[in-house]
Amino acid sequence: MPTDPLRLAALASVAIAQIPPDSPTWRRDMEQVIARAHAAAWLAGTAERLGVKLDSPLLSRARLSRAERADIKALVEKQLDYLGGFAKDRAEMSEAAIAARMQLYAGATRETFYAARWGDWGVPDELWPGNASPCLSNCRCSISIADNGDGTGTLTRKLGASERSCSVCPDLAGEYPIERKAG
């Protein structure tokens, strides 16, 4: 399993593309893919944070703490709430529009990856990729943090590898002083 958030989103995209938009089990299938993809993104982000390989015996779904499970559940529930609204809208949508909207759920795994990877830092909400920009789960920006070793660091937000960005992301690109969360 890759630890690159864009590759994780691509894998989720492939799994979502396998779900027929007119399937009688569409909602259940989407829920399962969403839950699996976010768990995988959390594990990948955690592996990056800990500096271990994904196949490390230290890292598995079974070894997640209650707090980590709760964090994943909250992120999945957020997506399932959106899915509930989508399910209501589906009857009025074309098959192409349904397929396009389904793909938005793949991009949302990046939020989960970054929450696991950088969640111990006080990253302002507007700097999380897709959080405060019109591109939402389509955001291709990334963040990284250089740790100064004293509880402070520098967050770098880079524009995604796209020739077009939303109107907000270019203004957010840059470096920002940051601190670790207390506790």
Image: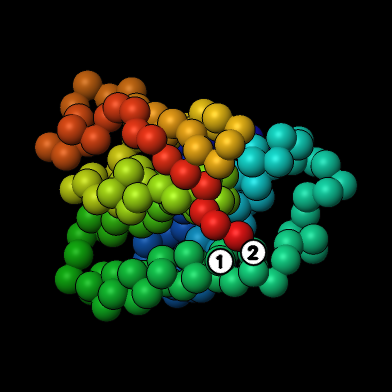
The image quarter in which residue 60 lies: bottom right
Residue at image mark 2: 68
Residue at image mark 1: 71
Neighbourhood count class around disc 1 (C-alpha, 10 Å): few under 14, some 14–19, many 20 upward? some
The image quarter in which residue 44 lies: top right
Q: Mark 2 belongs to which amino acid? A: Glu
The residue that appears at 36% across and 56% down in the rendered structure is 102
Can you name the residue that lies furthest to the front here?
A: 150
The residue that appears at 41% across and 69% down in the rendered structure is 78
- Label 1 – label 2 distance at C-alpha: 5 Å
Neighbourhood count class around disc 2 (C-alpha, 10 Å): few under 14, some 14–19, many 20 upward? some
- Position of 25 relative to 179 (above/below): below
Q: Mark 1 belongs to which amino acid? A: Asp
The residue that appears at 76% across and 36% down in the rendered structure is 53
- Residue 46 in view (yes/no): yes
Task: Determine whether label 1 and label 2 are within 8 Å by CB.
Answer: yes
In the structure shown, which secondary structural element does the residue marked by tag 2 occupy?
A: helix
User: How far from the left and from the top, in percent, is residue 170?
Assistant: 20, 30
